[in-house]
């Protein structure tokens, strides 16, 4: 079984100066090794889900170790207290979104999102809205009425919220618009009023996607994928008849 010292040593070996420069432009701070996401995947694969190791990696304070921690942590073991404890250490959007992906799979996704979306601080509110973006299509988590209310809130507030909160609200609009036809109409009406959403991405090539075209492309891609699945099912049925 890998120890936290083993993993930190492997991360340090895999880090590069160039990646450290890139991650710094995205807001990551020292200490960090600068490990590519490909290398993080390679290092994390044999670790599988290891919640205790994730906790120890997070405590190291190293940026790359924390990204890896959020990949190998057990979503079912995430509590409100742990999520908020980790959030208190977050100082960049990379960790916000990595934490959001984890929390969105956990039993406390709704409580965390509900608690944080209206926070006046950038990272907590960003996490709250990113959870919406990750989970809006889960009918067991959100009702249509709840999501419609969030669309109205975004319409009213997106122009005045902190920088990265605007970006995550934009992502939430996209996710809600993909839920069903009725919500999509509400989202597209809002998008026509508030888009393009202005977000400062600093010295990076990142962009905040325009809502309507992004939804259109995603639906088209899903239609193609559905047609391929149907064709494979027909071929399988024909072969077995």
Image (cartoon, rainbow, N blue to C red):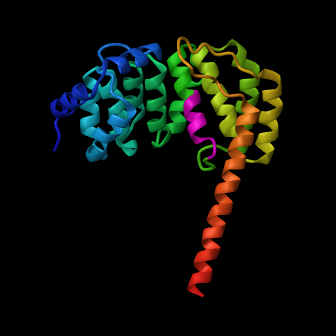
Which span of residues is magenta-colored? 129-137
Instruction: Using the image, determine if residue 135 lies above or below residue 100.
Output: below
Residue 153 lies, in percent from the top left, at: 72, 25
Please state if 132 lies on the left or on the right of 1 as rendered.
right
Is the C terminus in the top left, top right, bottom left or bottom right quadrant?
bottom right
Name which residue lies at 58% across and 41% down.
135
Residue 116 lies, in percent from the top left, at: 54, 24
Residue 50 lies, in percent from the top left, at: 27, 43
- Closest to the observer, 26 or 155: 26
Name which residue lies at 30% across and 28% down.
65
- Closest to the observer, 129 or 4: 4
Q: Main secondary structure of the magenta part?
A: helix
Name which residue lies at 71% across and 47% down.
219
* Quarter-of-image position of residue 33: top left
Q: Residue furthest front?
A: 18
* Quarter-of-image position of residue 198: top right
Is the N terminus in the top left, top right, bottom left or bottom right quadrant?
top left
Instruction: Using the image, determine if residue 229 lies above or below residue 212.
Output: below
In this orientation, does residue 179 appear? no
Please state if 82 lies on the left or on the right of 59 as rendered.
right
Name which residue lies at 52% across and 26% down.
127
């Amino acid at each position: 079984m890998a120890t936290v010292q083993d993993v930190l040593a492997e991360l340090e070996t895999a880090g590069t100066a160039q990646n450290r420069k890139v991650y710094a432009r995205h807001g990551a701070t020292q200490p960090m090794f600068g490990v590519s996401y490909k290398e993080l995947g390679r290092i994390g694969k044999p670790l599988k889900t290891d919640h205790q190791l994730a906790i120890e990696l997070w405590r190291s304070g190293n940026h790359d170790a924390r990204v890896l921690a959020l990949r190998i942590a057990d979503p079912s073991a995430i509590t409100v207290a742990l999520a908020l404890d980790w959030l208190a250490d977050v100082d960049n959007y990379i960790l916000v979104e990595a934490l959001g992906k984890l929390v969105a799979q956990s039993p406390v996704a709704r409580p965390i999102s509900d608690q944080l979306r209206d926070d006046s601080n950038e990272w907590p509110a960003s996490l709250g809205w990113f959870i919406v973006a990750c989970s809006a299509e889960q009918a067991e988590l959100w009702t249509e009425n709840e999501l419609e209310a969030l669309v109205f809130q975004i319409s009213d507030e997106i122009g005045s919220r902190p920088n990265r909160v605007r970006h995550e609200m934009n992502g939430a609009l996209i996710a809600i618009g993909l839920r069903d036809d009725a919500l999509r109409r509400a989202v597209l009406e809002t998008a026509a009023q508030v888009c393009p959403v202005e977000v400062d991405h600093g010295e990076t090539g990142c962009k905040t996607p325009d809502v309507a075209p992004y939804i259109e492309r995603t639906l088209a891609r899903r239609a193609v994928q559905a047609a391929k699945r149907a064709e494979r099912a027909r071929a399988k049925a024909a072969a077995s008849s």
